[in-house]
Amino acid sequence: MDEPVRWTVRVSKDTDVAVRTFLAQRGRKKGDLAKFIEEAVRWRVLDRTVAETKARNAKASVAEIESAIDEALKTVRAERFVQRR
């Protein structure tokens, strides 16, 4: 993990109790709260990114999407092949 950054956040008392209870029931410690929050934020960012990408591409045809994927794969494979030499 990169060097940690300290966040100061406020949540409702109900949320605090729910998360801490959830972690305690699974044998996790107080220090695991930061790990839990980081994982939750990463999942939420991924979820939003996927939803936005789907919305942006909703009107694209399957052929257009497959073509874009094929082109991206071709580019990545070409870059990786060059790096291995």
Image (spheres, rainbow, N blue to C red):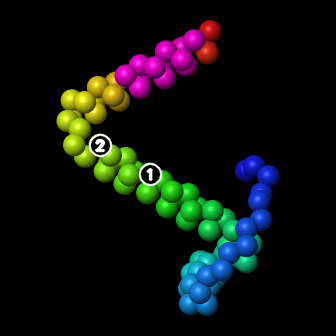
Kindly identify the residue that appears in the image at 44 percent across and 57 percent down.
48
Q: Which mark is residue 23?
A: none
Q: Which mark is residue 57?
A: 2
Residue 68: where, in percent of width, then height?
33, 28
The relative height of residue 34 versus residue 21 in the rendered view (above or below) is above
Crowd band around label 2 with a 10 angstrom C-alpha radius: few (<14), some (14–19), many (20+): few
Kindly identify the residue that appears in the image at 48 percent across and 23 percent down.
76
Kindly identify the residue that appears in the image at 25 percent across and 46 percent down.
58
The relative height of residue 43 versus residue 37 in the rendered view (above or below) is above
Q: Which secondary structure dominates the residues rendered in magenta?
A: helix
Quadrant of the rendered image containing residue 25: bottom right
Give the alpha-carbon distance from disc 1 to disc 2, as whole Å: 12 Å
Q: Is 19 positioned to the left or the right of 55 in the image?
A: right
Magenta-drawn segment? 71-82
The relative height of residue 39 versus residue 21 in the rendered view (above or below) is above
Quadrant of the rendered image containing residue 21: bottom right
Residue 20: where, in percent of width, then height?
63, 83
Residue 63: where, in percent of width, then height?
21, 29
Note whether residue 25 is visible. Answer: no
* 9 in the magenta segment: no
Note whether residue 50 is visible. Answer: yes
Q: Which mark is residue 49?
A: 1
Classify the position of the C terminus by image quarter: top right
- Front residue of 62/32: it is 62
Q: Earlier in the sequence, mark 1 or mark 2?
A: 1
What amino acid is found at the position of numbered circle 1 in the picture? Thr
Q: Secondary structure at mark 2?
A: loop
Q: Secondary structure at mark 1?
A: helix
Quadrant of the rendered image containing residue 82: top right
What amino acid is found at the position of numbered circle 2 in the picture? Asn
